Image (tube, rainbow, N blue to C red):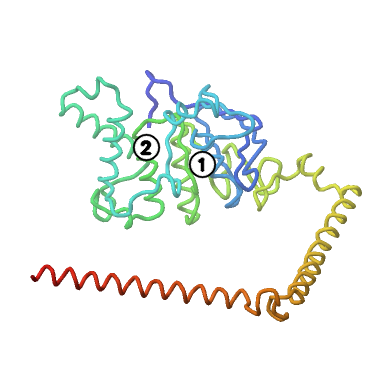
Amino acid sequence: MEANPDEPHGAAVVADGFGLKGPRGWVFREVGLRAAPGSLVAIEGPSGSGRTCLLLALTGRMKAHEGHAEVAGLRLPRRMAAVRRISALGPVPGVSDLDPALTVDEHLRERALLQRRYDGSVRALVRHPAERAAATRARIDEALAAAGLDRDALPKSGRTSVRDLERLEALRLSVALALIGRPRVLALDDTDLKLSDADRAEAWALLRSVADAGTTVLAVCSEAPEGALRITTTAGDGASADADGEPTGTGAEDADETDDPDDTDDTDDADAQATDEPQDAAEAGTSAQAADEDRPGTDGGAPDARSGGDTPAAQATDETDSTDDTEDTGNTIEEGESDAFAETGRA
């Protein structure tokens, strides 16, 4: 795909001390990057090392907490919305997945309509329908050619469902969908996942051709190809997080791990005090129970002589019986009144 000389294409990506912190600690930190427009940047590292978060942060889709970065002169994280407008996502699991039930043509038409509706100019919206349709077809053909996807070579041409595509074909379709908007930055995740050596070589050749056309490409992978600008996010180094998401090799962490004798003594005293408190509470509970057993008028003790031999339980029983008698009398009176009223009504 050739760059449009009338529009600025490609974007320089610069990062200095870039870091993002999650609920469990630092996902990545101290990332430095200098990439010219039209560069192929490979974010290399194992799964779980923060490589996808770094990809999304550099494209304005996650907010960093340390350092700063610039994309086409737009400073992150302050200008995240502006960076999103000039960047596009290829395949990113959980973010830009293809719908397996839709066909290739349906994906392309949907993306073209969304692009025209939300990113197109007002002048383009008032053009004649035939002109708009021709422009849409031209943009789709341009993106397909740049992604190297031939619809006629598919099993059912454009009516082929996404679930029937091979892994490399699905990758090409995702790239084509992203290129419909003519972005200055293209970002992809899991570029070489589940690809054979031959398909991996074709995938990197595709991305290199996109970069040569002027678009800056950020691609997450497990092994970076030769000739690409490499960023390693291996867990445990200074620019990434360890397996638990905690930063490694920082001065603050080293200070926390240093044993302080005074702190140890205070901790031992607190532990001893916490151990003695449950024992004291248990002894107090035992003494209170023994005192209750010896107290007159309670279970296990002699009845109180001043109460006339009636225990509180007996008094409560008498009160209950009195209440029941009152309720029975009230019910009898109400029933008598009801009978009298019925007889009066019949008379």
Report the quarter where the N terminus lies. Answer: top left
Indicate whether 342 appears above or below 115. below
Residue drawn at x 79%, y 67% as measured from the top left: 284
Residue marked by disc 2: 146
Q: Mark 2 or mark 1: which comes first in sequence?
A: 2
Identity of the amino acid at label 2?
A: Ala
Instruction: From the viewer's perspective, tell me whether residue 343 is left or right of residue 103.
Output: left
> Can residue 177 be seen by looking at this rendering?
yes
- List the single residue furthest toward the left: 347
Q: Give me the C-alpha separation between circle 2 and circle 1.
A: 17 Å
Q: Which mark is residue 219?
A: 1
Name the kind of residue labelled 1 in the image: Ala
Q: Residue at x 24, y 34 (%)?
A: 137
Quadrant where the C terminus is found in the figure: bottom left
Q: How far from the left and from the top, in percent, is residue 272?
A: 86, 60
Q: Residue at x 62, y 40 (%)?
A: 21
